[in-house]
Image (tube, rainbow, N blue to C red):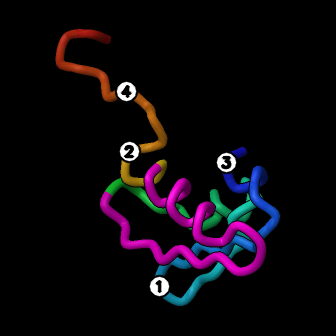
Amino acid sequence: KTAHRFPCDVVIQKEDQKVDGKSILQLLSLSAERGTLLRLETKGGDALAAIQEISGLIQRGFDESTPTAGSE
């Protein structure tokens, strides 16, 4: 959803595989687990704002909370 807010192109790369950062199916095809090195590229209108917001979201773990021991 975050990537769709920007008019620029968004590309996410894992190793030699590049996918459209606005396609959830393509993003899932990366099978990127926590700790995976990803490259984020943006091109076009609002590219800088997009890269800042998307990279922040990735660094925050997509704002998902991590369960603590015994909270399951």
Q: Is residue 60 above or below residue 22?
A: above
Which is in the foreground here, disc 3 or disc 4?
3
Badge 4: residue crowd in 10 Å (few <14, some 14–19, many ≥20): few
Q: Check the picture and name the quadrant holding the N terminus.
A: top right
Instruction: Give the quadrant of residue 24.
Output: bottom right
Q: Which mark is residue 67?
A: none
Residue carrying label 4: 65
Mark 4 and mark 2 in contact (Cβ < 8 Å)?
no
Q: Magenta residues, as a range?
A: 35-56
| Neighbour tally class for label 2: few under 14, some 14-19, many 20 plus, Cα within 10 Å | few
Query: Which amino acid does the dot numbered 1 rest on?
Result: Glu
Indicate the amino acid at tag 4.
Answer: Ser
Q: Is residue 43 magenta?
A: yes
Q: Picture coordinates of residue 49 (x, y %)?
A: 60, 62
Sequence-earlier tag: 3 or 2: 3
What is the spatial separation of the Cα atoms under label 2 and label 1, in whole angstroms? 21 Å
Q: Quadrant of the C terminus?
A: top left
The residue most toward the right is 7
- Tell me the crowding category of disc 3: few under 14, some 14 to 19, or many 20 or more residues within 10 angstroms, Cα based: few
In reply to whether residue 11 is colored magenta, the answer given is: no
From the top left corner, tell me how far across and down residue 10 is, in percent.
69, 71
**Position of 63 compared to 71: left or right?**
right
Q: CA distance from mark 2 to mark 4?
A: 10 Å
Residue under label 3, please give it: 2
- The amino acid sitting under disc 2 is Arg
Circle 2 sits on which residue? 60
Q: Are marks 3 and 4 in contact (CB under 8 Å)?
A: no
Task: Report the side of 24 relative to 56 (left or right).
Answer: right
Viewer-side residue, 66 vs 7: 7
Residue 18, located in which quarter of the rendered image? bottom right
